[in-house]
Amino acid sequence: MKLALRSAIRLTADLLFPPRCVHCGSDGNLFCQACESESTRLRPGEVCRRCALPFGQAGQAARAAQGTCEACFLDPPALDRAIAAYAFDHAVHDAITAFKYNDIRALATRLGRLLAEALPDPARGSVDVLVPVPMSRSRLRVRGYNQSELLARQVSHIASLPLETGLLVRRRDSGPQANAQSHSERAANMAGAFEVAGGAPGGVSGRRVLLIDDVMTTGATLNACARALKESGAEWVGALTLAREL
């Protein structure tokens, strides 16, 4: 009932008032071209292939031959590849916050396109399936939608890649990651939180899986997903996110 009421209110508001950019307030688009252009892009070759952090930041020394930072070279994460479109600041921060917490689901179209554009052509050709990072049932009931799934549907459509929303499931509600302060706390919080669904169509054995999420903070959630997929036989697991917290 609450979800239906919210949808009706949102539809009425869209009819009465033109969309405004969630960052600058200009008319015409929920996330305008000007704000998108001013956002900090994270370009391949300038960031680590395994954690998506820029080389030279936070002690990330580049190893040119591997394309990884020193930290990922010495202690490889479960993710084989991490791609983030933007730094999680300013306009992108406001867009994701509005999309995720303010029930502005219409942003999925615009943000999903920006996410798909960040996926290099060679990567598109090597991915077998897209998998959104799942939410717990309790949080899904409260929010009414999984923002990662909405983004994944857009990427699937634009990049012509298959999407499986029920392949990975959340075993338990670990609580908001924002409550965990350090990288080690976040990793411990996510340990064993995900598993591959029994009887999932196609399974994951021998497949190359690309996880879809809105923001990569420390990478604890995405790496926990990657470990679960690899334990079930996935050959390769990457992640594509709209933003990376630096």
Image (cartoon, grey):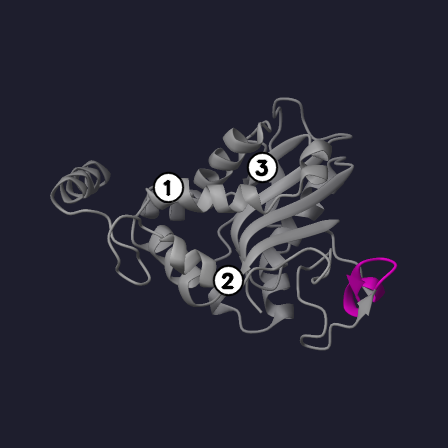
Highlighted magenta segment, given as a residue range:
64-74
Q: Local crowd at mark 3 within 10 Å, few (<14), some, or many (≥20)?
A: many
Q: Amino acid at mark 2?
A: Gln
Q: Amino acid at mark 3?
A: Val
Query: Disc count in the image?
Result: 3
Residue ranking furthest to the bottom:
59
Which of the 4 quarters of the picture holds residue 87? bottom right
Looking at the picture, how far across and down is residue 173, in whole percent?
48, 51
> Disc 3 vs disc 1: Cβ atoms closer than 8 Å?
no
First in sequence: mark 2 vs mark 1: 1
Residue ranking furthest to the right:
65
Q: Is residue 196 visible?
A: yes
| Vertical relation: 66 (above or below) 135 | below
Q: Local crowd at mark 2 within 10 Å, few (<14), some, or many (≥20)?
A: some
List the residue tagged with mark 1: 145
Under tag 2, what secondary structure?
A: helix
Number of the label disc, if any, that sits on residue 177 = 2
Quarter the N terminus occupies: top left
Q: Amino acid at mark 1?
A: Tyr
Number of the label disc, if any, that sits on residue 131 = 3
